[in-house]
Image (cartoon, rainbow, N blue to C red):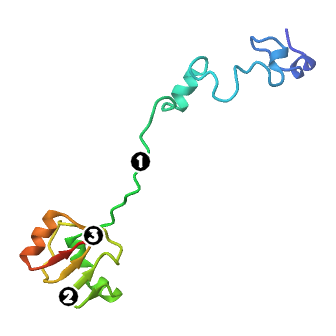
Amino acid sequence: MVRTKTKKLRGGHYGRGMKSGRGKGKRGGSGMAGLGGHRKIWLIIHDKNHYGVHGFTSHSRTHQNSITLTQLNDRYDELKAMGYIVDDLIDLESAGYTKLLGTGNFEMKCRIKIPQATEKSINKLSNYGTTIEND
């Protein structure tokens, strides 16, 4: 039997009865309700990482702005132009660096002012007569 236009306009029914097909009623919860039950398939397809703990938040405020010996060698002229190198003193602390790392080589005899330096960098620089001034 064919549905009349009046019956069609009164809302769909599809296994829930006529009145539940109209309006906002009988939706099975609102928002994220039912993700562990009747909306499980939606969850698997669209939001696989919904449950569980993911990653962590670091509450540490310390940030090391480090420079390697290779970078120091490459940026020597740039630092000199900016005024961070005066005579034989390289002031990396006022340039914004907090730690000197020992990767690469820096073959100049000078003094370097920086808050922290690794043992490797100190050993490499002492071979060339360079000293490190820590505060």
Mark number, residue 121: none
Q: CA distance from mark 2 to mark 1?
A: 40 Å
Q: Residue at x 81, y 11 (%)?
A: 17
Pick the quarter of the image with the C terminus. Answer: bottom left
Q: Is residue 87 left or right of residue 63?
A: left
Q: CA distance from mark 2 to mark 3?
A: 18 Å
Mark nearer the viewer, 3 or 1 = 3
Pick the quarter of the image with the N terminus. Answer: top right
Q: Is residue 55 left or right of residue 134?
A: right
Q: Looking at the image, do the residues carrying marks 2 and 3 touch, with CB atoms under 8 Å apart?
A: no
Q: Is residue 31 above or below residue 78?
A: above
Local packing at callout 2 (Cα closer than 10 Å; few below 14, some 14-19, many 20+) is few
Q: Is residue 37 above or below residue 43?
A: above
Q: Nearer the viewer, residue 56 or 7?
A: 56
Label 3 sits on a secondary structure element that is loop
Q: Is residue 69 left or right of residue 96?
A: left
Q: Quadrant of residue 22?
A: top right
Label 2 sits on a secondary structure element that is loop
- x%, y% of residue 34? 62, 21
The amino acid sitting under disc 3 is: Pro
Mark nearer the viewer, 2 or 3 = 3
Mark number, residue 88: 2
Q: Is residue 20 left or right of residue 72?
A: right
The amino acid sitting under disc 2 is: Asp
Q: CA distance from mark 3 to mark 1?
A: 24 Å
Residue lying furthest front: 135
Residue, disc 1: 58
Mark 2 vs 1, N-terminal side = 1
Q: Is residue 3 above or below residue 51?
A: above
- x%, y% of residue 63? 36, 60
Q: Quadrant of residue 134?
A: bottom left
Residue, disc 3: 115
